[in-house]
Amino acid sequence: MTFDPSKPVQTRDGRKARIICTDRKHPDGPIVALIEYPESSPHAGDETYRSYYADGRYYPSVESPTDLVNVPVVTHKYNRLYRGSISSNSLHFADIASDTEQQARDGRSKGFDGRYIGLLESVIIDGVVTTVNFIPWEKPENA
């Protein structure tokens, strides 16, 4: 993935980072960033500054745990899952995904209540579905 300094960043090893400028005039690179010390450091919680090349690398030609990378964008989408109308062995899901589990549960169709069996949760990282989980429906006590 291409590094974009205008988006949130962290170090390759997961430490918090924030870019101070991207236009520094220096042979060590145009990016100056503040990086949190690791939790294991006696300076944990403090920040240090580093210079980076335009592609986010700390060293010009090798990867390093200190390189800047964009923070992965993680989203969740939820689809309602129903037993099929012709056969209880078939399944179908609502083609409209909800942004929250509660929205998906609240939006289930009344006509399908007897066939509603749960939700499919899709975990999407940087636009790629990485995991799909089944969340079974738990019938409310007052239903």
Image (cartoon, helix red, strand yellow):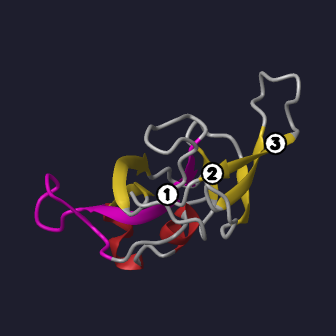
Q: Earlier in the sequence, mark 1 or mark 3?
A: 3
Quadrant in which the N terminus is drawn: bottom left
Looking at the image, which is closer to me, 35 or 136?
35
Q: Quadrant of residue 66?
A: top right
Q: Is residue 128 left or right of residue 14?
A: left
Q: Is residue 97 above or below residue 142?
A: below
For discs 1 and 2, the disc positioned in front in the rendered view: 2
What percent of the width, then of the height, locates residue 101?
Answer: 53, 62
Looking at the rendered structure, which numbered label has been put on residue 55? Answer: 1
Report which residue position mark 2 lands on: 28
* Residue at 11% in and 66% down: 86
Marks 2 and 3, how far apart at CA: 16 Å
Amino acid carrying label 1: it is Asp
Is residue 83 shown in magenta?
yes
What percent of the width, then of the height, locates residue 81?
Answer: 32, 61
* Residue at 67% in and 59% down: 26
Report which residue position mark 3 lands on: 48
What percent of the width, then of the height, locates residue 90?
Answer: 14, 57
Regarding mark 2 in the picture, which secondary structure is present there?
Answer: loop
Amino acid carrying label 2: it is Asp
What percent of the width, then of the height, locates residue 29?
Answer: 61, 56
Marks 1 and 3, how far apart at CA: 20 Å
* Residue at 42% in and 48% down: 136
Looking at the image, which is closer to me, 72 or 115?
72
Estimate how packed mark 2 is, as few (under 14), some (14 to 19) or many (20 or more) residues with alpha carbons within 10 Å.
some
Q: Earlier in the sequence, mark 1 or mark 2?
A: 2
Which span is picked out in magenta? Answer: 67-95
Quadrant in which the C terminus is drawn: bottom right
**Circles 1 and 3: CB atoms closer than 8 Å:** no
Estimate how packed mark 3 is, as few (under 14), some (14 to 19) or many (20 or more) residues with alpha carbons within 10 Å.
few
